[in-house]
Amino acid sequence: MSTFIFGLVSLGALAFIEKASILNLGGLDKRISIVACLGVYFLASLWENQVTKIVPSPYLDEVFHIPQAQAYCRGDWLVWDPKLTTPPGLYVLTTLFSKLHLAACSVHILRFFNTVTLLLTLSYACDCRNLIVSSHDQKTAFKNSKDAAKLSKATSIDTLHTALNIALFPPLFFFSGLYYTDILSTCMVLKIYKTFLEGRDGKGRRNFQIYLWGMVSLTMRQTNIFWAAVFMGGMEVARTLQNPLPSTSVHEREKLQSVQSFVQARWNEALHGMVFDVPLRSATLEDIVLTPLTLIPAVLVRLPLILKNLLPYLSLLTTFTILIYLNGGVVLGDKENHIATIHLPQILYLWPFISFFSLPLLLPSLFSLLRTALHFPSTLLRYTKNPTPRPVILTLLSGSALLVVLLIVKFNTIIHPFTLADNRHYIFYVFRYTILRHPLIRYLLAPIYLLCFWLVYNTLSGANTTTTTPSSFPSSTPPSDNKQNPPNPSTKPKPQETKPHFHTTPTEELAQHKDPSPTSSFFLIYILTTALSLITAPLVEPRYFILPWVFLRLHLPTPTFPNKLILGTNSSAQQTEKATRINIYLLIETAHHLLINLVTGYIFLYRGFSWPQEEGKVQRFMW
């Protein structure tokens, strides 16, 4: 109990020092935020207590981590286990934590440190989501303060619930009961991202903070360099070259008569130091290609300013490169089993991973795909009557993408010896019953990789964040004619004379405002960073996918049901407001994560097994 209370006091002090926005969300009662935090803290503490009660001794990688931390607690700072591959940041901070607690570095205290860190991760995730959405809201104008107040409240609920679901993310939450580096590593990277999102006010101090926290994150895990330097450096470039009127290009495209004139306009903007960057919601394939093409001239035009703003990220990369040179490699120990190798299928495995854990948020995109498949015959018939080049181009690109995936699978599939040697990890069974089951299965999975990627991209673009319903079918007759000659109610309009009209309620319009679509630059930078962080690792582990999932989840627009689908067409204003506060997709995501945590936690604690060569020693399943 004393440990539980100490954790609460520690979190309260950190929240005060950090001025955490999780306790100051606009339009939201603080009690809701406090209850959410206490709920996660209670679940994580309960999980850690059960793990320590049933598994009191160090388990798996804890065999290396815990003795090293305990050596530091004793003051033996020169002791180092050569099997450890990551720097000692976790052990140093845990030692300080135990000193504050005036307790020995027992297995319980060391594990409990991750329980507390999970709550700090929740806070930083809330800060990041709030800053991401707020940056969009500042560009949104409302006719009255009532709409602005509704937006503030809806945004706050979405922000808190999103952060809550990130904290409950199964591969992250699981390690709140064990002494691993994953939670602290994620926490530190989110701290850097929060600092980045806060802007360049007082940029000298901000640059120092980014560099400082970046170095701290590297003491947790070396691969954090990709997120602390490459991802945020790329986002800094995009922010520096941002067009002050990003929506103009989208509307202008409709006015220009040719692709050539549109491209020429974008090129002229690039020559003035502005990159072409459009929201994914309205972006076409040409837009995605045009973004990096306009980046090069825009960077050259504003190179001095770019280098100035990139100072903390370039400093991080330089320091990291020097440390690698002095160490003779990226990992500290066990270098023979951790050799960097080009492993392209890692980026393919990521999309089913994200699709599984984010399935509730991908449901609208999945339903949209099913509707498209059902209407494919009629769509094909319309195309044969009025052929256009775009479907042909998209078909060719899809076929080319499938061919590339098949070539990657054939020539670059790597099965690390550790994957097959340890049946305590779920990934062992994933490989055993898929890729290793039959030689053809790895090729049959290629369309699934592409399907999962499309679902994730479509959801990220916000293409299905709201669903509109047809409200009426007005005549195509001009309004002026309607006034002079009112239509006969008994006369039914012909099918070809009608057009379905869609509308959204004010509440749904607010939902669109609170869910900004990420831009094409974010998507490209995210893909590049994710690829760099994954394809150099020969070993496939769900833990490697934590940061790619977290960053994607922070930027995912939240899908919303139209109120009529939930409440009916005769819903009252009070019912409509209630539906705005309760997002069904976020609730399903919460239940989804809780169920996975419950199942994996139960299996870990109560469904152990033993190896013939180690009779009497319980082995346990884990991520």
Image (cartoon, grey):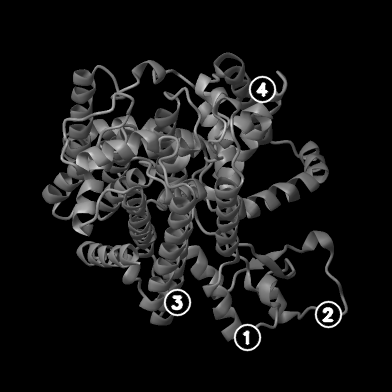
Instruction: Provide the residue designation for mark 4.
Output: 436
Distance from Cα at disc 1 to Cα at disc 3: 16 Å
Residue 458 makes an appearance in the image? no
Q: Quadrant of residue 398?
A: top right
Q: Residues within 10 Å of mark 2 (few under 14, many from 20)?
A: few
First of labels 3, 4 by sequence position: 3
First of labels 1, 3 by sequence position: 3
Q: Horizontal placement of 158 versus 99: left or right?
A: right
Distance from Cα at disc 3 to Cα at disc 2: 41 Å
Q: Quadrant of residue 7?
A: bottom left
Q: Amino acid at mark 4?
A: Leu
Which dot marks residue 150? 3
Residue 314: x and y in percent read 20, 32
Q: Which residue appears at 66% of the width and 24% of the height?
A: 442
Q: Amino acid at mark 2?
A: Asn
Distance from Cα at disc 4 to Cα at disc 2: 69 Å
Q: Quadrant of residue 593?
A: bottom right
Question: Which quarter of the image is occupied by the N terminus?
Answer: bottom left
Which dot marks residue 572? 1
First of labels 4, 1 by sequence position: 4
